[in-house]
Image: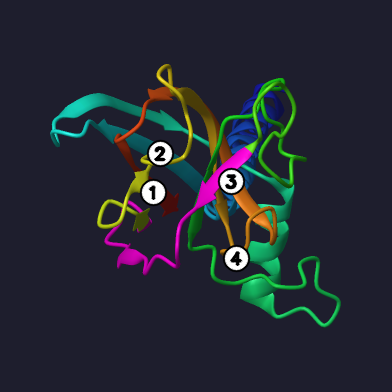
Amino acid sequence: MKKYTTLALIGAIVAGVAGLISIDAISATSLVTMQGASDFHESGLMIGHVTYEVRGADGHVKQYLQSDNLITNKGTDCAATAIFASSNPACATPGNFAFIAIGNGTSPIPSSTNTILNNTGTNSGEMARSALIVASITPNTGSGTVVTLSNSGTPFTFTGLGLGPLGTTVTQSGLFNTGTPLGGNMFSIRDVSVPVTNADTLAVTWTITLT
């Protein structure tokens, strides 16, 4: 009887060890699978950042602001169309988002569904749009690919725009794919509050990081 009891005890121990090994194997497989899925979700992000530099007639900096921006639905649609060359494009003209626009319209905080700068309120909406800007692209070395567009070489100038002695306030900027005022697709938008007067200049620098 004692012999059978000892054999039964040994069998139970062996079964328990085998069960632990089985659990460990399942856990290891699950962790590997989860890590793989996490790797996919951590890529494909686009982050925008904007800086504004106002200089007076004397060339001195009067104001410097910086903030993150909002990439629009049309911006992501155009990016997808450009990358994958869809035969059924979500964006008819996806390329050349190399034109910066500024405006002084007023309305609620911008939404990802916006397609133009706000044009409501007492002001006129879009005020000016830059010429084509050749982007500077810094290759990805582990922290993302950085695209920089800046009109600092030929900044917006407010001389002769009839702003009056009190000037106006630039309330928004956006990144577009055409130089035609009010035209094209808008990739991203940002609310801002930048007061300007006659003879001031405004340089806007847009930085998009792809990770």
Residue visible at 65% across and 52% down in the picture: 186
Looking at the picture, which amino acid does disc 3 mark? Answer: Ser
Name the element at disc 4: loop
Distance from disc 3 to disc 1, alpha carbons, whole Å, reads 11 Å
Name the element at disc 3: strand
Residue visible at 48% across and 23% down in the picture: 169
Circle 1 residues within 10 Å: few <14, some 14–19, many ≥20? many
Tell me the residue that label 1 is attached to.
207
In the rendered structure, which segment of residues is drawn in magenta? 126-147
- Are discs 2 and 1 less than 8 Å apart at CB? yes
Numbered disc in front, either 2 or 4: 4
N-term mark: 2 or 4: 2
Looking at the picture, which amino acid does disc 4 mark? Answer: Thr
Query: Percent x, y for residue 44?
Result: 55, 55
Looking at the picture, which amino acid does disc 2 mark? Answer: Val
N-term mark: 4 or 3: 4
Distance from disc 2 to disc 3, alpha carbons, whole Å, reads 10 Å
Circle 3 residues within 10 Å: few <14, some 14–19, many ≥20? many
